[in-house]
């Protein structure tokens, strides 16, 4: 009878496999715990966002002859009607134009404030942050009614302009594109400021000192160092403000009225007032698709442009 031989290699292999198996089990438990922690949020998002959005998408492909939903057929006629009607195309262009104006105004007003926050002491920075974020604690309806009173033909702004001799007659600031841009800029300016300020906080101050030692002027240092390195914050702020302006309803409805028919107002009228739910759903998805397309193209262009290194 041949004696049983003991192979040391089997023991070495088993010792190597045992830590690997235990490591996989620990990783599996971590993933399981993470899924359990995220489960309430996932259920909330699926129940109150994903499913309603899918249902709206389903409705957008239903064509009805009457408001009661009679003679319903599945087609893309709602989208075809939108892109062939000059009124809705004008509303789409108006929405994009107002949103772009809001982004420009917010950027011009917000960047100096963000730069001041980045250059000041921590105590002053905290105070400025509180002042910038404080309007977000007030309802946007209340803020819009405040601007409504200021922009009236006999309001404070027009009286001030006439008193200073800048204009002889009251300007049409209310129920116009200018009024909507003013209201949206006031509502979303804090998002632009905080986005840019967060990017400016991460810039190493020694870079500007080195540029000054090499003979660069403050303006040259700003153009060559501060502005390019703050581009991620600028892009994120522009995307936030543009996206929220494209989907804003309260401010255009109060400050623009029927004179500024942006797409959110048009979709609301189609669904609530005219009871054309399917066509209103199609208008909503056109607005969503156009917004995503513009944001995606803009971010890709910035990330692959001249200053693409700062986005890595």
Image (tube, grey):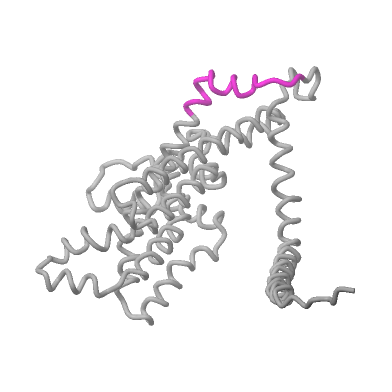
Residue at (30, 52) in percent of width and height: 307
- Which stretch did the figure color magenta? 73-90
- Horizontal relation, residue 1 to residue 62: left or right: right
Residue at (31, 61) in percent of width and height: 229
Instruction: Please state the horizontal and vertical placement of residue 312, each as a whole percent of the image.
Output: 39, 57
Which quadrant of the rendered structure holds the N terminus?
A: bottom right
Does residue 183 show up? no
50 magenta-colored? no
Q: In which quarter of the image is residue 221?
A: bottom left
Q: Which residue lies furthest to the front in this view?
A: 1
- Of residue 61 and residue 150, the one placed in the foreground of this image is 61
Does residue 278 show up? yes
Q: Which residue lies furthest to the bottom in this view?
A: 123
- Of residue 124 and residue 298, the one placed in the foreground of this image is 298
- Of residue 124 and residue 15, the one placed in the foreground of this image is 15
Instruction: Please state the horizontal and vertical placement of residue 256, each as a whole percent of the image.
Output: 49, 40
Q: Quadrant of residue 266?
A: top right
Q: Is the magenta stretch mostly helix, strand or loop?
A: helix
- Horizontal relation, residue 162 to residue 65: left or right: left
84 magenta-colored? yes
């Amino acid at each position: 009878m041949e004696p049983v031989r003991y192979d040391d290699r089997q023991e070495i292999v088993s010792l190597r496999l045992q830590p690997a198996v235990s490591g996989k089990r620990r990783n599996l438990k971590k993933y399981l715990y993470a899924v359990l922690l995220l489960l309430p949020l996932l259920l909330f998002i699926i129940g109150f966002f994903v499913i309603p959005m899918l249902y709206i998408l389903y409705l957008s492909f239903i064509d009805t002859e009457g408001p009661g939903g009679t003679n319903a057929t599945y087609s893309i006629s709602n989208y075809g009607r939108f892109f062939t009607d000059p009124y809705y195309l004008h509303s789409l262009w108006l929405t994009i134009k107002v949103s772009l104006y809001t982004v420009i105004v917010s950027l011009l007003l917000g960047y100096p404030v963000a730069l001041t926050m980045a250059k000041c002491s921590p105590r002053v920075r905290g105070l400025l942050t509180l002042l910038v974020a404080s309007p977000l604690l007030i309802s946007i309806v209340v803020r819009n009614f405040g601007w409504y009173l200021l922009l009236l033909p006999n309001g404070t702004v027009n009286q001030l302009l006439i008193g200073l001799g800048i204009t002889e007659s009251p300007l049409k600031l209310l129920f116009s594109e200018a009024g909507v841009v003013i209201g949206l800029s006031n509502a979303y300016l804090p998002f632009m400021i905080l986005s840019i300020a967060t990017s400016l906080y991460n810039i190493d101050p020694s870079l500007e000192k080195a540029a000054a030692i090499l003979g660069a002027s403050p303006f040259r240092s700003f153009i060559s160092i501060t502005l390019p390195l703050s581009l991620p914050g600028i892009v994120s702020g522009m995307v936030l403000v543009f996206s929220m302006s494209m989907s804003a309803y309260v401010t255009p409805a109060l400050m623009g009225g029927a004179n500024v028919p942006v797409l959110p107002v048009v979709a609301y009228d189609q669904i609530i007032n005219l009871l054309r739910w399917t066509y209103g759903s199609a208008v909503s998805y056109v607005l969503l698709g156009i917004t995503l397309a513009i944001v995606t193209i803009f971010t890709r262009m910035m990330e692959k442009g001249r200053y693409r290194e700062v986005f890595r």
